[in-house]
Image: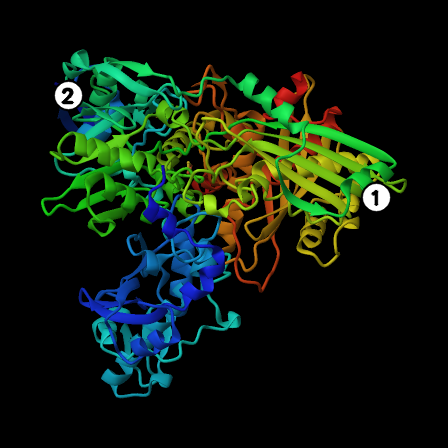
Amino acid sequence: MIPKLMQSLVLPVANAKASRRQFMLGALAAGGGVAVGYHILASSTAAASETAADGNKAVAFTPYLTIDNTGKVMVLSSQFEMGQGSYNGLATLVAEELDADWSSIDVQGVAGNVKAYGNVAFGGAIQGTGGSTSMVTSWERYRKAGAAARAMLVAAAASEWGVQPAEITVENGVLAHPSGKTAGFGAFAAKAAAMPLPVDVKLKQPADWKLIGNAKLKRFDSTRKTNGTEQYTIDVNLPGMLTAVMIHPPMFGAKVKSFDAAAARSVKGVVDVVETPRGIAVVGEHMWAAIKGREAVKVVWDDTDAEKRSTPELMAMYKDLAGKAPVAIARKDGDVDAGFAAAAKVIEATFEFPYLAHSAMEPLNAVARRNEDGTLEIWGGHQFPDVYQMLAGQIVGITPDKVQLHVMKTGGSFGRRAVFDGDVVVESVYVAKAIGFRAPVKVQWTREDDMRAGRYRPSYVHTLKAGIDGDGKLVAWSDHIVGQSIMAKTAFDGMIQNGVDPTSVEGANNLPYAIPNQTVGLTSTDVGVPVLWWRSVGSTHTAFAAETFIDEIAEAAGRDPIEYRLSMLDPQSRHAVVLKLAAEKAEWTKPLPKGRFRGVSVAESFGSVVAQIAEVSTDDSGGIKVERVVAAVDCGLAVNPDQVRAQVEGGIGFGLGAILGEEITLTSGKVDQGNFDVYTPLRIDAMPVVEVHILASANPPSGIGEPGVPPIGPAVANAVYKALGKRIRTMPLAKSFNA
Amino acid sequence: MVTLTINGSEHKVEAEPDMPLLWAIRDLVGLTGTKFGCGMAQCGACTVLLDGAPVRSCQTFIGDVGNAKVTTIEGLSGKVAETVQTVWADLDVPQCGYCQSGQIISATDLLTNNPRPTDDDIDAAMTGNLCRCATYHRIRAGIHEAAKRLEA
Ligand code: FES
Ligand code: FES
């Protein structure tokens, strides 16, 4: 059930411009230094803007950065850091415009002012990290804040030194005047707060950038990740804090009928055993006590409403649906039936995709504490902070503004911490409440909890059909996608138009190829397994189906896979450009040594286009190994080129692990996999050599956290076909050999 | 009561002998650099040194540790370890960083025993350390680079 209030948070993306107008640069004195950020106007009208410009401060101020009297610059990030490097990206934008000393920069996650930290890409009315939008939403705002801060420091120095601001230079965190006067930011931070805001903030020209686009810039946060000092949610330790583990329903939708905790209560270190709407919580002095206590709890479940089906049954149903007409249409060009009727050759294929777990290295967790004044504090990976404030406030009976979120860094997420129901976050509040708020509580999931408590990349079936004419030209194409909607029954269900959840069809209904007749259909299924966005969302399956099928068609047409794709693309298009770049760097036309085979694919996601060429080898027993991947990337302007590279390397490893061996299956409604012995993300011995080539671009930055993932599966599958002559249509890959 | 020697200091912990060393280090001693990832020796996030040899602390019980010296990421020292840590930052190996305490301890152990590892040696030594961010490409490069710097 979605609270009413939450629905009002979600505005159509079309409103993005209107919300942007509500922003007005501002600054305040803060802690002996200066805070620079934005005033949020009560209304978005021009009249209101002018009022604020006249100095009316009766509007909320939200800092984007602070500079203290030691010269330390703290960037306050609206974007959550899960390893993808968003903090580093934001730090780069600020430091560039500030001309700050890179080593003086730090970043802290912030939450709690929807208006000020709203994600522009989501319409500006909800704070959130996702869809690879961190740079998209931050590009203007954070650079402007940095530039304004720089201007105010310069103004402060000019007034103190009695010189013209224009004569002052700023480099590497040092203000200098030709007379020989120099000072660090700390010396003028306090005075800067009293300076008038610059009327017209000028951003640097690209030619003057030192940090943006600098491939040699190192992440500001690497050292703390090499010596054990980086703090994650699991590391939060508050005075008197207790640790709880959950007993979740063994089947999705089951409920507690009764439980017996007598034996658990006598386990040393167990403090309490309580029931919450999300299951039983065993509360201990520490994690081990809670784990041992949990083993001793007996729960009787009511599974009346539970999802009890098994994977084979669900797959059979999906395949049956896929053979019927789709319920909704996501794209329709030309007349597909006429196209097929006129085709010289028609090819069909069915693809099967399993549920996938995010399995971030840090299992889900959150810490909740109720304070004497009635406010609530929650530490966690707050990927959807406004939602969590609201849900937590409702549980406790306080307004969202009384819920203070501490945005922790987390050991990965891949989408898992952006949830509508707040899962582990609300659990921490439920448990704290159930023990009468007598102590702060950390709820820590074990790996098994993390793998079995749901929220998976949905399982899908695609049926594809293509028609080519006598010249091998692709004249008709249809794709019918069957699977659960991620957005249905959530606060985002307004995004579902005409029965089409965009996250089910993205990557399928925007194929770049010139195909005169095509339809993309969708049949959304009703299954009680909780699903969620998983790094690159719809493109995890749509790109696989489309890009392996295109290869099959190219073969039927007797054409080279790259040449065939290019024949259907505008030569100037981003797809064509990255394909050509990848082909050149991978020496596509050069013969490979014996036992090596190549495959290609290209996919657009989150505004970026990535082509990959995979090289695989086979051994005598028919085993395959991905040896090398060459990637060509157009992600607009690369703010941190080396981090773009890192995200593509990691995305390739993440996507490769999935197609090689990841699969969540159900037996009578129970998840079969519990840990990494049977759910198998990629390990180092299967990691290929990766080469990433970034296209020079003057376009604003687009996504990079996810776009490296979609092309790897089809590129590898296409290479495996070349190696073994077997089309890969059932994931994970090995299943295609047994099918 | 069990006495543990961690990073050179003695800690008396009030716990049963079947408590995994991981939770004693984290929850009782308060050193949080050692991470929990799986609890069943499948991921390597909890790797520590026991008398200089890497072990999975989630499957090492405090009652079995005896007088052995425990070294966690916080206490890791020496030329090999410091070189690995420096190279890790120079190459920006970590993404989320959560697995990296374990990766660094395993890499240090590898280089201590095999100063010039091949790619195959690296794969064999590091395969027990999962990285969900898949930083493997840079882990490999990092180990080669550390080997080079240590040789110089
Ligand atoms: S937590 Fe010990 S190996 Fe995973
Ligand atoms: S860096 Fe994130 S799990 Fe390894």
Please, what secondary structure does the residue beneath circle 2 have?
A: loop
Q: Quadrant of residue A724?
A: top right
Q: Is residue A347 left or right of residue B122?
A: right
Q: Earlier in the sequence, mark 2 or mark 1?
A: 2
Callout 2: 10 Å neighbours few (<14), some, many (20+)? some
**Pointer 1 indicates a residue of which chain?**
A
The disc labelled 1 sits on which kind of residue?
Lys
Q: Quadrant of residue B59?
A: top left
User: Where A339 sits versus A272, above or below?
Assistant: below
Would you say the residues marked 2 and 1 are in contact, meaning their CB atoms lie under 8 Å apart? no
> Ligand 1: does it lie within 8 Å of the C-beta at label 2?
no
Which disc is residue A118 wearing?
none
Q: Which of the two discs, 2 and 1, sits closer to the camera?
A: 1
Give the quadrant of the C terminus of chain A.
Answer: top right
Q: Is residue B55 left or right of residue A34?
A: right
Residue at 73% x, 43% y is: A518
Q: Where does label 2 land, which residue?
A: A269
CA–CA distance between discs 2 and 1? Answer: 71 Å
Q: Is residue A211 visible?
A: no
Q: Is residue A111 visible?
A: yes
| Residue A616, image x, y percentages | 67, 31
| Residue A394, image x, y percentages | 24, 42
Q: Where does label 1 land, which residue?
A: A473
Please, what secondary structure does the residue beneath circle 1 have?
A: loop
User: Where A710 sits versus A699, above or below?
Assistant: above
Do tags 2 and 1 sit on the same chain?
yes
Give the quadrant of the N terminus of chain A.
Answer: top left
